[in-house]
Each structure stands twice: as structure tokens, then as C-alpha cells.
Image (cartoon, helix red, strand yellow):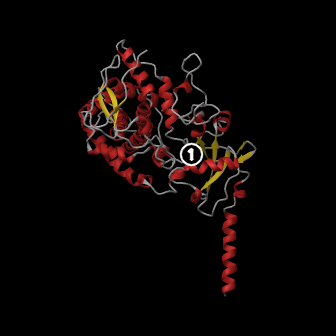
């Protein structure tokens, strides 16, 4: 009896191993052997998946396979591999990867003119920081709110006070790392709560829709919801119309989710930007001197090299949004079956020593040519590349530029630590690299000629200079 049980157990394990055999998926790129049901999940570092991918790349090359549960996923490492797949074979790799249900029906539409919302929110942020009266604060707290507020002003036609509990809830609901459920659903964390929180957000949206219905002015729609409601009324007799209240709620949810992710990435980049500028006083001096010099001429300064280097160094979303192949595809001698998920590792391009002289340092010279003019290397792909290039690229850069220049025009930065003592190591969080927590104070900036030197007798304050002598 015992022998039969042992033989049955051995047979069962053998069948499981055969079931999980990578060969059953065809000639996929090489990778670690998966466990039945679990795949390679136990081999992954949930706090920082790049740490897991790096040794796999060294062992298997620039294209390799990992199993997320029972499903294989192909990993692309390095600019050349990503370009070959996402640009040279763009059509084959143009499918959407594994997304949350609330994003799968994301509608396309006309471009929004959002720079006005950026400008208004930037001024509101200046007013909020002025209330701090130079006290130390965690900038993440306020910067996270500006993201949700910009989207609310576009979709709902209103912005919220930074202390509004509704804004607190909305800001906490969405996080940039929740756009990768194909991997993160296998790990514990806040993202597990996403689907249970969707209903709460839907209730909030429904409440706003009902309020818009009561106050609707057919001659002057104020926002997206008003425009949708007018179209609903126009097509009321069409039983097959997609313009109905349930679709409106789901569309607003998708717009809010997608828009907040783009804007929230910018907010985290903004946090990283202030941290990097404070730890590089020479760069900060030049930035504020340039702002002081040109603002009076009614034009904004050209800070392309520093904006791009902040984005490159911060590397907030090191793993790009998932793609899938829409047909059976041959790639670098491997066979990729239709529907397989592909993850581009954007960080591998942004920190490639072959393309960036100082990949692990903050060095705006990466984006300047020999004559000091701005240049943009083709390997700069913080928003991926190819047909699935994130449409929030220019939106995020515009937001980052406007907030950075507005705040540095009004404030100088103070920190309880000397620049050389500030830790730049990001907090590892699944597929993301959010900036480390830090304290900063925003002091009134008096531009022009280096006059901003605060004397603090009660504490050791290291204040970054406000301008530089040419």
C-alpha cells in the first residue's frame, strides 16, 4: 500500500513537471524552469523585479522567458531587442497585454487642451506651499494630489481642495504600478485591492453624473460629462446607442484611471526632480538663473536637457506596459505564439553605458552635443516605443516642465541634510522605482544675482543657492 502511494506520488509529480514543461509552448526564448501552477513567481523579488531580471538576462541573453503562474511572458532587454520587436516588427507586437478590465475599453477621442489646467493647478500648489511658511514637509503628499485634481478638472469640471477627503480617497486608489496586473497579481500588496475599490470610485462618478444632470445647460457644456449627457439625450430613441449612463460611468472611470496614471508618473518624476536638483546645487543654480533671466521677457526657459535627464535618471516605470503578439511570430530565431505577453525593460535602455556616459549619475550632459545644444538620443524611451508608445509622453513632459519652472520661480529649496548626505536610492516596489521619502522646505525665492541666502540660527539648514554668476 505504501509503495503504491509512493509510486502514485512520483507519477503525479512527473505529470505536473511535464505539464509545466516550457517545450509545450513551442520554441520560446530560454529561461528558468517553471514550477507547476506557480511558474517562476517564487524566484522573483517582489520588492524589485529588475533585481530578478538582471541575472536572468546575464544567463539567457537579451530575450528570455519567465512564467507568471502558468502563463509564459517574453522579456525584452536592451534598446536593440526592443527596437527589433516594437518598431521593426511593430504590427506583430501591437496587441495589448494583460490590462485591468477598467482599461480594456478605453475610448479614443479628441485631444484635450490641458495646459490651462496645468497652469491653474500649479498656481494652486504655489499657494498651498506658501501656507507652509518654510516648514519641512514631504512633497509626495502634495504632488500626488495635483495629478488627480488635473483629471478631475477636465472630466468633472471642478478641482478639489487638497484637504478634501474625496480627493484623498481618489489619490490613494490609483497607483502607477497597478497597470501591470499580469505580474503583480501574483504578489501581495495594495494593488490586490484595486478591483474592490473600483466600485467605490464608480459610486463617486455616478454621484457626479447625477449632479451634472441636474445642472446641465444644453447651450454651454462645461466638461466631458456634460458633453456626453447631451449626446445621450440626442440619441435617446436609439436603442442600440452606446451613449447611456452605464457607459458614461465606465468611460469616465477609464479616462480617470489612464489620465491619472500619466499625470501621477509626472508627479513622482517631479519629486525626483526636486531631490536631484537639491543634491546637485550647480545644476539648480543654473536652472533658477535661467528662469530668473527669461521670465521677465514673458517666455519660459529652455530646460530640455535637465527635464529629460530627470526623466532618464528617475526611471519611474522601468518595465514598459505589456504588449502581446497578434499572430504567430518568429523573432530572433524563436517562435512566439499568438497572444503571448511581451514586457519591454525600458530601464535597460535608459541606463545603458553604451549610450549614456554616466548611466547611474544625474548628468544633464547626456542630452547636450559638443556645442552645448540639446540632443535627444534615440535610446531615450521612458514611455516605450513603436505603435504602443504612450500618448502621455508630451503631456507628462509639459506637466513636469510647467510645475518645475513655476515652483522654482517662486521658491528656493531647503533641506535638513547636506546635498551629499541625501539618499537617492529609489524605493523598490514591484515593477516601479518611486523616489525615496525626503523632507524639504520651500522658501520664498528672490531671483537675480544670488541674493537668496537664508540665515538659520536655530538649526543646521543647507540651502541650495538660488542663482549663479555667469
User: Could you tell me residue 113's position as x and y percent?
Assistant: 40, 25
For the C terminus, the quadrant is: top left
**In the rendered image of this protein, does residue 205 appear above or below residue 380?**
below
How many marks overall? 1
Looking at the image, which is closer to me, 175 or 57?
57
- Report the residue marked by disc 1: 97
Element on which disc 1 rests: loop
Judging depth in this view, the residue of 279 and 393 nearest the camera is 279
Observer able to see residue 391: no
Vertical arrangement, residue 467 with respect to residue 199, above or below: above
The x, y position of residue 72, in whole percent, is 63, 53
Residue 139 image-quadrant placement: top left
Quarter holding the N terminus is bottom right
Q: Is residue 322 left or right of residue 91?
A: left
Looking at this view, name the residue that lies furthest to the bottom: 1
Q: Quadrant of residue 469?
A: top left
* Pick the front one: 416 or 405: 416
Q: Quadrant of residue 288?
A: top left
The residue lying at 36 percent from left, 23 percent from top is 466
Residue 307, image x, y percentages: 47, 27
Q: Position of residue 129 (x, y in %)?
A: 28, 33
Residue furthest out toward the front? 457
Residue at the image point whose x is 57% and y is 31% from the top: 380
Q: Residue furthest right?
A: 333
152 shown above or below 177? above
Disc 1 residue crowd, few under 14, some 14–19, many 20+, Cα 10 Å:
many
Residue 162 appears in the rendering: yes
Amino acid at each position: 500500500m505504501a509503495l503504491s502511494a509512493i509510486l502514485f506520488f512520483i507519477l503525479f509529480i512527473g505529470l505536473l513537471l511535464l505539464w509545466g514543461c516550457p517545450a509545450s509552448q513551442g520554441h520560446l526564448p530560454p529561461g528558468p524552469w517553471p514550477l507547476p501552477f506557480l511558474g517562476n513567481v517564487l524566484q522573483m523579488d517582489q520588492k524589485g523585479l529588475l533585481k530578478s531580471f538582471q541575472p536572468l538576462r546575464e544567463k539567457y541573453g537579451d530575450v528570455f522567458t519567465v512564467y507568471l503562474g502558468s502563463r509564459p511572458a517574453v522579456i525584452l532587454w536592451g534598446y536593440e531587442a526592443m527596437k527589433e520587436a516594437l518598431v521593426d516588427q511593430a504590427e506583430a507586437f501591437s496587441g495589448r497585454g494583460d490590462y485591468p478590465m477598467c482599461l480594456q475599453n478605453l475610448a479614443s477621442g479628441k485631444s484635450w487642451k490641458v495646459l490651462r489646467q496645468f497652469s491653474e493647478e500649479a498656481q494652486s500648489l504655489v499657494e498651498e506651499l506658501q501656507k507652509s511658511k518654510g516648514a519641512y514637509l514631504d512633497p509626495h503628499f502634495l504632488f500626488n494630489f495635483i495629478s488627480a485634481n488635473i483629471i478631475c478638472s477636465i472630466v468633472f469640471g471642478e478641482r478639489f481642495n487638497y484637504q478634501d477627503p474625496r480627493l484623498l480617497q481618489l489619490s490613494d486608489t490609483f497607483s502607477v504600478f497597478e497597470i501591470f496586473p499580469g505580474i503583480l497579481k501574483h504578489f501581495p500588496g495594495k494593488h490586490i485591492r484595486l478591483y474592490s475599490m473600483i466600485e467605490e470610485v464608480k459610486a463617486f462618478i455616478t454621484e457626479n453624473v447625477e449632479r451634472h444632470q441636474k445642472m446641465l445647460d444644453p447651450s454651454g457644456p462645461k466638461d466631458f460629462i456634460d458633453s456626453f449627457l447631451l449626446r445621450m439625450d440626442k440619441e435617446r430613441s436609439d436603442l442600440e446607442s452606446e451613449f447611456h449612463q452605464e457607459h458614461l460611468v465606465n468611460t469616465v472611470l477609464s479616462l480617470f484611471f489612464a489620465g491619472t496614471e500619466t499625470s501621477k508618473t509626472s508627479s513622482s518624476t517631479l519629486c525626483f526632480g526636486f531631490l536631484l536638483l537639491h543634491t546637485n546645487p550647480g545644476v539648480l543654480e543654473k536652472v533658477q538663473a535661467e528662469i530668473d533671466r527669461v521670465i521677465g521677457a514673458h517666455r519660459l526657459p529652455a530646460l530640455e536637457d535637465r527635464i529629460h535627464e530627470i526623466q532618464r535618471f528617475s526611471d519611474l516605470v522601468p518595465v514598459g506596459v505589456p504588449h502581446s503578439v497578434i499572430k504567430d511570430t518568429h523573432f530572433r530565431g524563436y517562435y512566439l505564439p499568438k497572444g503571448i505577453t511581451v514586457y519591454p525593460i525600458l530601464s535597460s535602455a535608459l541606463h545603458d553605458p553604451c549610450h549614456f556616459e554616466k548611466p547611474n549619475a544625474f548628468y544633464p550632459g547626456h542630452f547636450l552635443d559638443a556645442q552645448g545644444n540639446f540632443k535627444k538620443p534615440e535610446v531615450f524611451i521612458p514611455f516605450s516605443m513603436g505603435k504602443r508608445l504612450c500618448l502621455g509622453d508630451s503631456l507628462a513632459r509639459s506637466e513636469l516642465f510647467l510645475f518645475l519652472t513655476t515652483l522654482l520661480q517662486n521658491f528656493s529649496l531647503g533641506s535638513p541634510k547636506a546635498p551629499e548626505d541625501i539618499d537617492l536610492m529609489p524605493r523598490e516596489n514591484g515593477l516601479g522605482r518611486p523616489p525615496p521619502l525626503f523632507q524639504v522646505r520651500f522658501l520664498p525665492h528672490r531671483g537675480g544675482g544670488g541674493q537668496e541666502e537664508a540665515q538659520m540660527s536655530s538649526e543646521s539648514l543647507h540651502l541650495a543657492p538660488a542663482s549663479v554668476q555667469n
